[in-house]
Image (cartoon, rainbow, N blue to C red):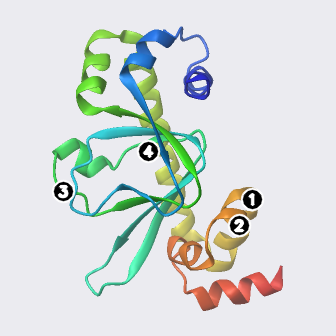
């Protein structure tokens, strides 16, 4: 719970967090490598905070080709937004790429916190805004950077290179695993 509180206070420094309140709302789940946190077709009913480890969010296209959408590392608070918001089956799966510990809050608990706690509302809004900004930045990078530039940008985040399989990095960056192999050989 300490890492989650630190994350919240980093997001909004003056926010006073009631640890007891969060302890009652969040549940800890430990996943071994390759364990699914969310499966295709399952309705996502939780927000997740990655306390330790890393998760891979992925999907299949109409031809059965697998694509990695994102990697959620430690100190990341997220959900599968479409499924969570609309209570519809998820088109994505979320799996642990190493031993991972998440803190998860069920939608009912989240709604209760949002209705009854102004400070939690502030944090939640700020977190969602930061998520949207990161997404916009990522889209812009894809639109104006070459594959090589996108790959080189990953070196600012060593965990991507150290923990993520090459094929998953390739699909996340919009390139083939052969292209990423060539780029790696230049480094």
In this picture, residue 119 sits left or right of residue 114: right
Q: Mark 3 and mark 4: span between their CA atoms?
A: 22 Å
User: In the rendered image, which residue does mark 2 sit on?
Assistant: 161
CA distance for labels 3 and 2: 31 Å
> Which residue reaches farthest right?
187
The residue pinned by badge 1 equals 158
Which quadrant of the figure has residue 93?
Answer: bottom left
Pointer 2 with pointer 1, Cβ within 8 A = yes
158 or 46: which is nearer to us?
A: 46
Residue positioned 75% across, 82% down in the render: 184
Q: Which mark is residue 89?
A: 3
Viewer-nearest residue: 178 or 26:
26
| First along the sequence among labels 3 and 1 | 3
Picture coordinates of residue 144, whole percent (x, y)? 57, 70
SS at circle 3: loop
If you read the primary sequence from the N terminus, does the residue marked by circle 4 or circle 1 appear first? 4
Q: Give the secondary structure at mark 4.
A: helix
Residue at the spot x=26%, y=32% of the render?
107
């Amino acid at each position: 719970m300490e890492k989650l509180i630190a994350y919240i206070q980093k997001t909004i420094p003056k926010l006073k967090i009631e640890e007891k309140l969060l302890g009652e709302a969040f549940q800890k789940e430990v996943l071994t490598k390759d364990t699914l946190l969310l499966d295709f077709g399952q309705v996502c009913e939780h927000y997740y905070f990655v306390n330790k480890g890393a998760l891979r969010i992925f999907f299949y296209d109409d031809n059965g080709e697998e694509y990695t959408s994102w990697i959620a590392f430690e100190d990341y608070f997220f959900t599968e937004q479409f499924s969570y918001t609309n209570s519809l089956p998820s088109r994505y799966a979320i799996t642990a790429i190493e031993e991972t510990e998440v803190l998860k809050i069920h939608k009912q608990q989240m709604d209760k916190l949002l209705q009854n706690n102004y400070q939690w509302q502030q944090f939640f809004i700020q977190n969602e805004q930061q998520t949207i900004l990161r997404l916009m930045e990522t889209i812009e990078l894809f639109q104006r950077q070459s594959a090589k530039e996108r790959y080189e940008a990953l070196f600012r985040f060593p965990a991507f290179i150290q923990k993520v399989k090459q094929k998953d990095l390739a699909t996340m960056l919009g390139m083939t695993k052969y292209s990423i192999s060539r780029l790696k050989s230049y480094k």
